[in-house]
Amino acid sequence: MKLLLIHTGGTIGMVATEAGFAPGAGVIEAALRDLRASDVTLLPLLPLIDSAQATPADWNRIALAIVDNHSEYNGFVITHGTDTLAFSAAALCFALTGLQRPVVLTGSMRPLTVEKSDGLSNLSDALKAARTAPPGVWAQFAGQLLHGARLRKAHSSALDAFTASRSAKPPLQPGKVPGFTSYRAAEIGILSMAPGQSEGLLTHALTTLDAVVLRVFGAGTLPETSALRAGLLAAQARGTPVIAVSQSPKGGVALGTYAAGNLMLQAGVIDGRDMTPEAAYTKLYHVLSLHADQRLSALARNMVGEFS
């Protein structure tokens, strides 16, 4: 059994500096020695970063490392910062196709270099999961194996910081051979509704961006102003995909339930159901990387269990 550990940075591998915790060399190597993980090969993706600095280019680097090494290893572990781990997990679910191995993301809330770190237990659990989990993209954190396309960071400091709704569909895109769809540069925004929000901001975003995630109220309502109506209709005319997801962490969106959300139906806004904002955002990035004639069907399809 051979595993590849792709280290991207994050809290798990950080050391104390004068400016605060930052990625350090040799931390993950020491942890692997402590775990006596002789069947694990380490691949650092340099430069190591705090995950707050992650971009779609980093999703591409991780996906490429997995595809390039797919036939050589039985499973993959990705050590990653927690702040954007849910984005990267969802992005890998959409990008990778034909996986025949488990890909397990993990990290920690406390660095391996401090007392009472959760890093060693999370890393040990992730290595075990990479040997036993079904093919697909998963997150292993605080003793739980979580669906990669349903993941969200629900707490900023607790050791069990992540949650994920269950899904009958695995976090896996089918394919005859392992491969991935590279993420292209795009201008995508997440707009969160709020009472009295700047209409100029909403109009500008809806008339200039390539795609938009709307974080709406409750089961799918928003302030139906003339400016927002004009912006959504302009986005529809431009062919700009807009997905609505709920600001509520549970329950999801059901467009058409309330009259205050009817504007979204008129403007062709996509019902995001119970997708997380992270999954909706990365799904938009993914479909914009596809041919134009594939985008609408991909948006409507439950590709990797991202919604119920």
Image (cartoon, grey):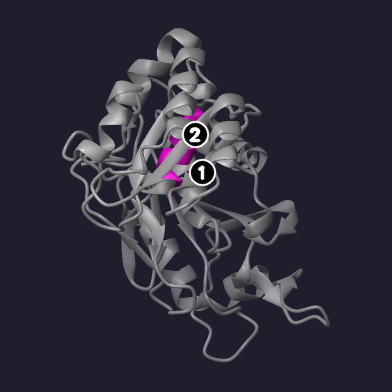
Residue type, numbered disc 2: Val
Q: Residue visible at 43% across and 21% down? A: 233
59 in the magenta segment: no
Q: Are marks 2 and 1 in contact (CB under 8 Å)?
A: yes
What numbered label is drawn on residue 190?
A: 1
**What's the magenta region?**
278-286
Front in this rendered view, residue 238 or 55: 238
Residue 74 shown left or right of residue 168 in the figure: right
Question: Secondary structure under badge 2?
Answer: strand
Farthest right residue?
Answer: 18
What residue is shown with label 2? Answer: 212
Q: Residue visible at 29% across and 44% down? A: 221
What whole-number distance in Å separates the C-alpha atoms at marks 2 and 1?
6 Å
Relative to 129, residue 98 above or below: above
Question: Secondary structure under badge 1?
Answer: strand
Rendered-image quadrant of the C terminus = top left
Residue 229 shown left or right of residue 38 in the figure: left
* Dominant secondary structure (helix, strand or loop) of the stretch shown in magenta: helix
